[in-house]
Amino acid sequence: MPSPITADQLSAVKEWLPEDAADNGWDDAEITTRWTGFISTTVRTYWFMRVSNTASYLDLPDPNGTLTITQIYRQAREMLDWWMLMIKTYGATTDPSDYAAKGTRIGKIKNRYPRPHNNFLPVGVDLRSPYDNVAD
């Protein structure tokens, strides 16, 4: 059984949840009930439940006519996959704000093609312009 959630942890979880999480039933009481002991796993639980709740949506046009309803499921699934990857990569105990601090490493940039060793012009090239001998 995890330790009770603190006010700082509650605000951190709410920071990582989408803005409409409360509309989907994830208010302070639900977050406290679903608290797993770590911020990242609690947020992953939200996305897991969101995927489960939207899996049965039919591909009908949105009332506004812009997006299909199954796009909600697809985006929730992508977020669930992202949180699973972050927890697998960095562990559940890592603060999610540290995920972005893990920078990418850029290696030495190499020239793909060797540079020519000589800059000689081919024999017989005339460097004069056709306009050099124009009579004024």
Image: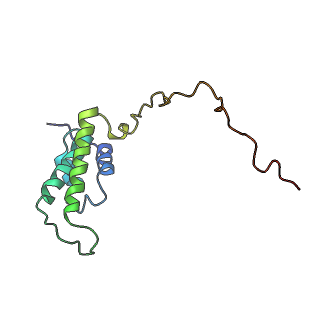
Residue lying farthest to the left in this orientation: 56
Residue 4 lies left or right of residue 126; in this view the side is left
Q: Quadrant of residue 53?
A: bottom left
Q: Is residue 96 visible?
A: yes
- Of residues 32 and 91, the one nearer the viewer is 91
Determine the residue positioned at 41% across, 34% down. 104
- Tally the numbered discs: 0
Residue lying farthest to the right in this orientation: 136
Residue lying farthest to the top in this orientation: 117
Determine the residue positioned at 15% across, 59% down. 54
Determine the residue positioned at 83% across, 52% down. 134
> Residue 126, percent across and down?
71, 39
> Residue 123, percent across and down?
66, 32
Q: How is the image coloured?
A: rainbow
Determine the residue positioned at 26% across, 41% down. 40
The quadrant the N terminus occupies is top left
> Residue 113, percent across and down?
49, 30
Q: Is residue 3 above or below residue 131?
A: above
Q: Quadrant of residue 50?
A: bottom left
Q: Is residue 91 above or below residue 83?
A: above
> Residue 108, percent across and down?
48, 27
Residue 113 lies left or right of residue 84; in this view the side is right
The quadrant the C terminus occupies is bottom right
- Of residues 112 and 3, the one nearer the viewer is 112
Q: Is residue 5 visible?
A: no
